[in-house]
C-alpha cells in the first residue's frame, strides 16, 4: 500500500542518493525502502560517512603536528604529506 508520506520518503532517499553519488562518486547507494537486499543499507551508508569524516579529521590533525611530535610517534613529515594528500574516501 502506497501513501503520500511513503512517496515523500522515497523522494527524499532518491535525492540523498543523487547527492552522495555526485559528491562521492565512488559509493553507489541504492537504498530502497522495503528492499534491504538491494544496494547498501542505510546503516552501512551512515557508517561509511562516519569513517570518511574520521579519516579527514585524522589527516588534518596529523598535518597540524610539529616535527618533534611526528618524531616522537615515528612518522616522517614526508609520510604525513603523503597521507594528507589522499582523498577522504581512500584508506
Image (spheres, rainbow, N blue to C red):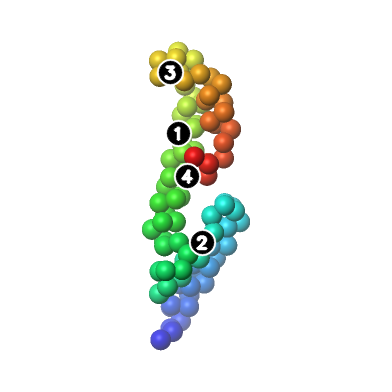
Q: Mark 1: which secondary structure?
A: helix
Quick one: 19 or 48, which is closer to the camera? 48
Q: What element carries label 2?
A: loop
Location of mark 3 (residue): 74
Which comes sooner in the sequence, label 2 or label 4? 2
Whether pointer 3 and pointer 2 mark residues with C-beta atoms closer than 8 Å, the reply is no
Q: What element carries label 4?
A: helix
Element class at badge 3: loop
Q: Where is residue 88 in the image (x, y as percent from the top left)?
A: 53, 41
- Disc with the residue nearer the chain's start (4 vs 1): 4
User: Which residue is the site of mark 2?
Assistant: 29
Badge 3: few (under 14), some or many (20 or more) residues near its Cα, within 10 Å? Answer: few
Cα distance, mark 3 to mark 2?
38 Å
- Count residues near mark 2 (Cα–Cα under 10 Å), then give few for <14, some for 14-19, many for 20+: some
Label 4: which residue?
52
Q: Can residue 69 be seen in this view?
A: no
Q: Alpha-carbon distance for marks 2 and 1?
A: 25 Å
Q: Which residue lies furthest to the bottom in this view?
A: 1
The answer to whether 5 is drawn above or below residue 40 in the figure is below
Q: Residues within 10 Å of mark 4 (few under 14, many from 20)?
A: some
Please tell me whether residue 51 is drawn above or below residue 69 in the rendered image: below
Mark-to-mark CA distance, 4 and 1: 10 Å
Q: Position of residue 87 (x, y in %)?
A: 57, 40
The quarter of the rendered structure image containing the N terminus is bottom left
Count neighbours of disc 1 (C-alpha within 10 A) and say few if under 14, some if 14 to 19, many if 20 or more: some
Any mark on residue 58, and which? 1
Amino acid at each position: 500500500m502506497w501513501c503520500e508520506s511513503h512517496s515523500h520518503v522515497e523522494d527524499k532517499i532518491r535525492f540523498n542518493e543523487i547527492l552522495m553519488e555526485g559528491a562521492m562518486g565512488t559509493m553507489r547507494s541504492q537504498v530502497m525502502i522495503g528492499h534491504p537486499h538491494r544496494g547498501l543499507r542505510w546503516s552501512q551508508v551512515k557508517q561509511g560517512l562516519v569513517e570518511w569524516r574520521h579519516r579527514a579529521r585524522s589527516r588534518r590533525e596529523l598535518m597540524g603536528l610539529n616535527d618533534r611530535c611526528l618524531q616522537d610517534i615515528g612518522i616522517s613529515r614526508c609520510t604525513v604529506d603523503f597521507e594528507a594528500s589522499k582523498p577522504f574516501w581512500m584508506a
